[in-house]
Amino acid sequence: MSKLTGVVTVPGDKSISHRAALLSLLASAPMEINNFAEGDDCARSLAAVRALGGIVEQDGSRLLVSPPHGGLKPPAETIDCGNSGTTLRLLAGLLAGAGIAARLTGDGSLRRRPMQRIIEPLRKMNAGISGTPDGTPPIETGAGQIVPLDYILPVASAQVKSALLLAGLASGVEVIIREKNLVRDHTERMLQHLGCACTVEDVTPETVVDPDDPRRKKKVRSTDEYRRSITLPGRQTLAGGRVDVPGDFSTAANFIAAALLIRGSHVILKGVGLNHTRTAFVTILKQMGAEITIKNRTVIGGEPVGDIEAAYGPLKPRKISGDQIGGVIDEIPLLAVLASQIEGTTIIRNAEELRQKESDRIAAVVRNLKAMGVKIGEFPDGFAVEGGTELNGAEIDSFGDHRIAMAFAVAGAAAHGRTTISGSEAVAISCPRFYTMLEGLRS
């Protein structure tokens, strides 16, 4: 087991790259996108832009994307979104809002993922959209008499929120989204950056007299139904312009975890996106005792950016649940791997959404950690990891899931003995150079 040392610049943020590419279809002028994400997922969004009449000029990670001449055009063929749920859900909202006839599908994994969560609210807007009887892809969009929407998100999903905002932008009607649990806000930030009057308002708790004890005061919200509202007024014009994409935090998280896991390691990650809806992983790790420092903070295109420095050190177990889960949903496999090396029991609950990802990530984590000799118990909505035993090299199954493949590559780097990953090529979905980057840090 070799320690990891060095400086890493991770590829562009996947979530932001998707949004920049798809929003270019509705822009009034060309968009320059710098540091566009690598990987098949974002390539699917670019292919969809081309299929709908957009013009993409690409030089490495720099893109110049021009909107379709004369407006969006129905695609000649079914748009294949591959493994990218972001492409399919956001594009479905955009096309349904615009009334464009299209058919969207994906690979076997994506065709099993739930789409009723976007179909139902889009139908409340009178949008033309349908899926299979099970509410899964393929998705078909078409004409509809679009009406404004005021909607409380029943699930904590940035993809659902973004699909509805794009439907509003494409149709010119007002859309108000209310969040019970805060989720990624990249779409709102980008809309604002590109000239839309998109407003975000938090429901701030007020201090009032406790009716049960007039001598005391307590904080309450004016409503328990939601914590934040996002309003996109009707008839907004999306300007063209420049979008600089920060480094992908979810990819960076793998290198942070590896540095914390392997004795003697010290890694610096340059230019990483630090959006507060994405960095709960760092917050939780610091609470567990991690040596993580953030330097050189700045803001680029409305998104906070900085350098992350992580070094090996002992961690403490804890329970992660409730509102914390939404902010670390992509990093939970990494938290499980880290937990395997922490003395004590780490518990993760309320993460049932993981069963609806590219794989059943709860089952995948449990099976693979058991294969490496870890004691782990499975719940319907998470697991409990009893840490403190050495990781043993093992045969790992990625289940075709890039997050699982990367998390267990990190585990393999810390394990005694050889680890092989079936379906290791899944990392190409988000970071094709991942293994090379990880190997480059070995001392």
Image: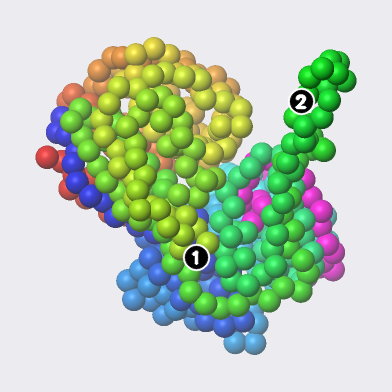
Observer-nearest residue: 285 or 295? 295
Residue 157 lies within the magenta run:
yes
Mark 2 highlights which residue? 218
Image: 257 above or below 394: below
Residue 417 x %, y % = 17, 25
Q: Residue furthest front?
A: 215
Q: How is the image coloured?
A: rainbow
Residue 334 occupies which quadrant of the picture?
A: top left
Residue 191 x %, y % = 62, 65
Taking the spot 32% from the left edge, 32% from the top edge, the residue there is 291
Image: 325 above or below 165: above
Mark 1 highlights which residue? 301
What span is colored magenta in the figure?
Answer: 134-162
Q: What distance separates the C-alpha of mark 2 from that of mark 1? A: 38 Å
Taking the spot 82% from the left edge, 38% from the top edge, the residue there is 222
Q: Is 71 placed left or right of 121 in the picture?
A: left
Query: Counting residues from the N terminus, which is met first, the one under dot 2 or under dot 1?
Result: 2
